[in-house]
Image (cartoon, helix red, strand yellow):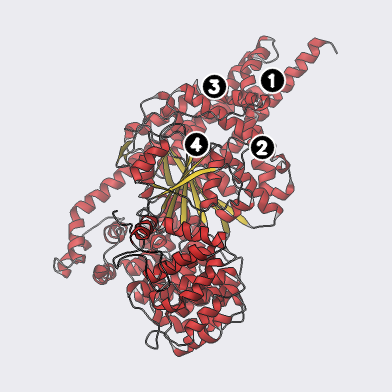
């Protein structure tokens, strides 16, 4: 076999990889969309008798702690905390962990909430970096601010867990705004479930373009920037039928740590948030699954689409790049670290469907699709692929992406309809269709960079700068 | 021949066409849905605008009942019942307006409809409404049953309790959950034993779809005077059942105590049988959870044997029993037990030490004296740390500093500050 034949065979093999990636990926996504259409719609109907008042007033409702790690968030920290302290929950504590900020984050908290430094006892059940001090105001007994040496977000969260006294804790990013009853809604599946629900995730929506008054979103609107609008569609797709679908199938591997509730003891038993990945939330979920299987514990993870947390998305491509590179790198780190789950019958659907999907479609897919943009035209140039098929296939790839994104917008329309203007709906539909012509490729490039960084052992946390995009 | 070429072109073309058509359909569905919802909300707005004030006036008895009722009866259309439901029960009514709301719902035929729905009947009238699809698809009918049960609970329709008890065994967990909640809202005494019976099954059957928290939440809503119904569970052989029953009673007691400053459990509000069970059996129960949860009830009992029982629990081998006992003693009437509580400041478990420090602070000046004395005298480093921790958290350090400047260090006979010294309120100096 000469080099020419070898090359042709290689190209053919790559074509097979591309085609299988396309059909497996889109097939699973379509399945998720179908499942989610039913489950999210039914969930929305169930809200008619949700009994939030009952949860609020019941003495049985377990107390909870919101843990908010903060690093160099001086611009928003006081506002965020003020918003969180207004959260509608019967027995709530709030712990803010300043992760060795080099700006005025801590000072602004001290000033805004009249905090006093205290020398309290620290009993770490999860090892963390050294603490610098505790700050309290006896008049706000449910608030504790902790200052520590910089150790990264997972380390800050672990400090919060060590100081947490309640059976459940909620992780919340410092740049997020919670809807007043979001925590009640997030706790509902935990309270209603007869099985130990160790993690409950809600939906993260994009704050850009919304009107905020008194630390609350008062008017929902679409952002002006194109990059932000594409992300609105992406978030709808990711949360509405990505997470809702996996939740219904029992294959949840990702719960957004920006806003999620966890069972404290279960998390401590898994060793808390691990420091060796940059997506500590996904890693924790996987660890919880492994812990449950190895210790024969019956646990449940829940995703519900009505508890809402608003977050600012990157408005520039440079910030978007940082975010997506980190997500992709963290995905690989987590999958690599927990590779024992792959096709492991002990993990059931997780091992046979969810984990391989994350690895092949969400992880390696970045490389397959990225290289596909070069290899397939090359195959066309070399006459391996006929022009008609090439055009059709490229077209199919693009329109299928649009089909799925439009499905996500429809799901939003069938359920929550958070964008009240008819114009916003049309804009979302248009962006759902055109997302695949340019934006998808740009994101794909960043994801590919994340993969390269994982391979080259890059470890740095790339911070996304928030500019206050809400109006 | 190259791989994946000739045979797939037609297939790929077909898929492209199907996907394009599918995308178009989804876009059409989204737009049509938006238009339909807008029409629906317009209709609701119209009804609310026209009949909302009438409904409000009727329920708050600002207009003659019959006149208001006739006005509401004039709402027409296939969605009439749904609109009436939206007008009357979509927002919680104040408790004093519930009776008239209930009567209106009854006279408008809503109660009958909800009762039929809870019991799973599909009526021809119901099929005509926009919600009809839910009624036709049997797997989705649980949504209708649950909502109907919820509505009966909102209006506290006493006569419906047998139906709701039956719904506790519905095939869907949602209906069971809502039925339990509705029964709690209605508070019909006769339904309490049935609710406990269902709770018993939840405790004993691990595969039950109904959550224990839901059932407990419903059970603790019943008044303390119903507590005798818990006797069979409190005397049950199964330790978990006894624990749950003790815990339910604890919550009932705690709720009553929150309403009344000097609340006590005597013959008026707790039967002698229950009192006897607590002071002779449950505080010595073999299940440590039951012992722990009995502490709070014991702390409210007037019976002379209750305090010694509580003091015994302070020495329990299980740390969480000691914890509950210490917490239960956090009432000024137990000031005489300050020494016994003080011993727990050197407990091996930090949560017990913390609870002991907090309990002593509840005793006011005398408790603080003891705490300060202990802090100064103890050789136990952990205990000292704990006391310092609690004093800082309560904002007492400025007060203590102030006192140490103006008065000698407290001794068992002399307090550290003036009479207006209050825990948690640092002085301005």
Chain ID at mark 1: B
Q: Which residue is depicted at the point 28% across and 67% down?
A: B105
Q: Establish whether labels 1 and 3 are both on one chain.
A: no
Above/below status of A414 relative to B273: above
Circle 4 sits in a helix, a strand or a loop, which is it? loop
Mark with earlier residue (3, 2): 2
Mark with earlier residue (3, 4): 4
Query: Disc 3 versus disc 4: distance between alpha carbons?
Result: 37 Å
Q: Establish whether labels 3 and 4 are both on one chain.
A: yes
Determine which residue is flagged by label 4.
Answer: A100
Q: Nearer the viewer, mark 4 or mark 2?
A: 4
Query: Disc 1 versus disc 2: distance between alpha carbons?
Result: 38 Å
Number of marks in picture: 4
Number of other residues with Cα within 10 Å of mark 4, as a class: few under 14, some 14 to 19, many 20 or more: many
Above/below status of A88 relative to B163: above
Do callouts 1 and 3 mark residues in contact (Cβ within 8 Å)? no
Query: Disc 3 versus disc 2: distance between alpha carbons?
Result: 24 Å
Q: Establish whether labels 4 and 1 are both on one chain.
A: no
Determine which residue is flagged by label 2.
Answer: A335
Do callouts 3 and 2 mark residues in contact (Cβ within 8 Å)? no
Q: Position of residue A338 (x, y in %)?
A: 69, 41
Q: Nearer the viewer, mark 3 or mark 4?
A: 4
Front-most of residues A14 and B370: B370
């Amino acid at each position: 076999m000469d080099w020419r034949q070898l090359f042709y065979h290689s190209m053919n093999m790559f074509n097979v990889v591309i085609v299988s990636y396309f059909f497996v990926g889109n097939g699973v996504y379509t399945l998720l969309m179908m499942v989610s259409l039913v489950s999210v719609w039914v969930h929305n109907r169930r809200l008619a008798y949700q009994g939030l008042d009952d949860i609020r007033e019941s003495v049985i409702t377990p107390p909870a702690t919101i843990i908010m790690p903060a690093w160099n968030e001086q611009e928003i920290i006081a506002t965020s905390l003020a918003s969180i302290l207004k959260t509608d929950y019967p027995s709530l504590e709030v712990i803010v962990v300043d992760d060795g900020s080099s700006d005025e984050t801590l000072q602004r908290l001290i000033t805004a909430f009249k905090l006093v430094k205290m020398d309290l006892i620290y009993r770490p059940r999860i090892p963390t970096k050294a603490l610098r001090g505790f700050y309290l105001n006896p008049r706000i007994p449910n608030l504790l601010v902790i200052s520590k040496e910089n150790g990264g977000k997972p380390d800050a969260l672990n400090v919060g867990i060590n100081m947490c006294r309640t059976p459940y804790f909620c992780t919340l990013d410092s740049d997020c705004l919670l809807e007043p009853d979001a925590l009640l809604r997030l706790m509902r599946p935990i309270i209603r479930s007869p099985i130990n629900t160790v993690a409950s995730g809600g939906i993260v929506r994009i704050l850009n373009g919304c009107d905020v008054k008194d630390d609350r979103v008062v008017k929902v609107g679409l952002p002006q920037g194109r990059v932000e609008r594409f992300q609105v569609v992406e978030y709808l797709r990711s949360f509405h039928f990505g997470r809702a679908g996996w939740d219904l199938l029992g294959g949840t591997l990702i719960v957004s740590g920006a806003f999620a509730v966890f069972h404290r003891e279960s998390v401590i038993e898994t060793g808390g948030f691990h420091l060796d990945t940059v997506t500590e939330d996904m890693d924790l979920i996987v660890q919880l699954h492994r812990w449950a299987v190895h210790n024969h514990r019956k646990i449940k993870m829940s995703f519900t689409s009505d508890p809402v947390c608003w977050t600012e998305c990157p408005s520039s491509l440079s910030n978007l790049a940082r975010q997506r590179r980190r997500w992709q790198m963290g995905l690989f780190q987590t999958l690599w670290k927990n590779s024992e789950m792959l096709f492991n019958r002990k993990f059931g659907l997780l091992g046979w469907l969810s984990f391989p999907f994350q690895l092949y479609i969400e992880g390696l897919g970045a490389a397959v699709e990225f290289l596909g943009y070069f290899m397939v035209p090359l195959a066309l140039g070399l006459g391996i692929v006929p022009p008609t098929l090439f055009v059709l296939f490229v077209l199919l790839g693009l329109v299928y992406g649009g089909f799925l994104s439009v499905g996500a917008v429809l799901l939003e329309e069938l359920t929550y309809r958070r964008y009240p203007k008819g114009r916003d709906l049309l804009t979302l539909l248009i962006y759902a269709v055109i997302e695949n012509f340019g934006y998808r490729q740009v994101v794909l490039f960043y994801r590919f960079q994340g993969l390269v960084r994982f391979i080259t052992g890059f470890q740095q946390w790339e911070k996304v700068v928030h500019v206050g995009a809400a109006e | 021949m190259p791989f994946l070429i000739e045979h797939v072109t037609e297939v790929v073309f077909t898929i492209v066409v199907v996907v394009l058509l599918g995308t178009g359909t989804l876009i059409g569905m989204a737009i049509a849905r938006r238009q339909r919802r807008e029409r629906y909300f317009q209709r609701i707005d119209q009804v609310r605008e026209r009949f909302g004030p009438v409904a409000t006036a009727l329920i708050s008895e600002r207009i003659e009942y019959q006149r208001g009722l006739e006005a509401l009866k004039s709402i027409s259309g296939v969605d009439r019942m749904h609109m009436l439901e939206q007008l009357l029960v979509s927002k919680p009514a104040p408790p004093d307006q519930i009776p008239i709301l209930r009567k209106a719902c009854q006279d408008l035929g809503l109660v009958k409809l909800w009762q039929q729905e809870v019991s799973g009947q599909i009526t021809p009238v119901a099929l005509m409404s926009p919600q009809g699809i839910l009624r036709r698809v049997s797997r989705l009918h649980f949504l209708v049953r649950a909502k109907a049960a919820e509505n009966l609970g909102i209006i506290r329709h006493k006569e419906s309790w047998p139906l709701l008890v039956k719904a506790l065994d519905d095939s869907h967990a949602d209906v069971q959950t809502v039925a339990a909640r509705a029964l709690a809202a209605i508070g019909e005494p006769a339904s309490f034993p049935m609710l406990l019976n269902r709770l018993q099954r939840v405790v004993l059957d691990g595969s039950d779809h109904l959550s224990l928290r839901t059932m407990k939440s419903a059970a603790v809503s019943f008044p303390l005077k119903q507590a005798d119904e818990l006797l069979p569970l409190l005397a049950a052989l199964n330790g978990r059942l006894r624990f749950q029953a003790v815990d339910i009673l604890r919550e009932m007691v705690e709720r009553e105590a929150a309403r009344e400053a000097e609340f006590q459990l005597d013959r008026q509000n707790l039967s002698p049988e229950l009192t006897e069970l607590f002071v002779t059996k449950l505080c010595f129960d073999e299940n440590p959870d039951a012992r722990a949860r009995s502490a709070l009830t014991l702390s409210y009992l007037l019976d002379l044997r209750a305090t010694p029982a509580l003091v015994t629990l302070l020495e329990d081998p299980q740390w969480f029993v000691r914890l509950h006992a210490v917490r239960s003693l956090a009432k000024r009437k137990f000031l005489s037990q300050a020494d016994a509580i003080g011993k727990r400041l050197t407990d091996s478990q930090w949560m017990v030490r913390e609870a002991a420090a907090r309990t002593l602070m509840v005793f006011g000046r005398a408790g603080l004296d003891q705490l300060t004395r202990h802090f100064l005298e103890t050789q136990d480093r952990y205990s000292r740390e704990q006391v310092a921790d609690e004093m800082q958290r309560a904002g007492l350090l400025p007060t203590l500093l102030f006192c140490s400047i103006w008065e000698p260090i407290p001794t068992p006979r002399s307090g550290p500050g003036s009479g207006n010294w209050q825990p948690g309120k640092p002085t301005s100096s």
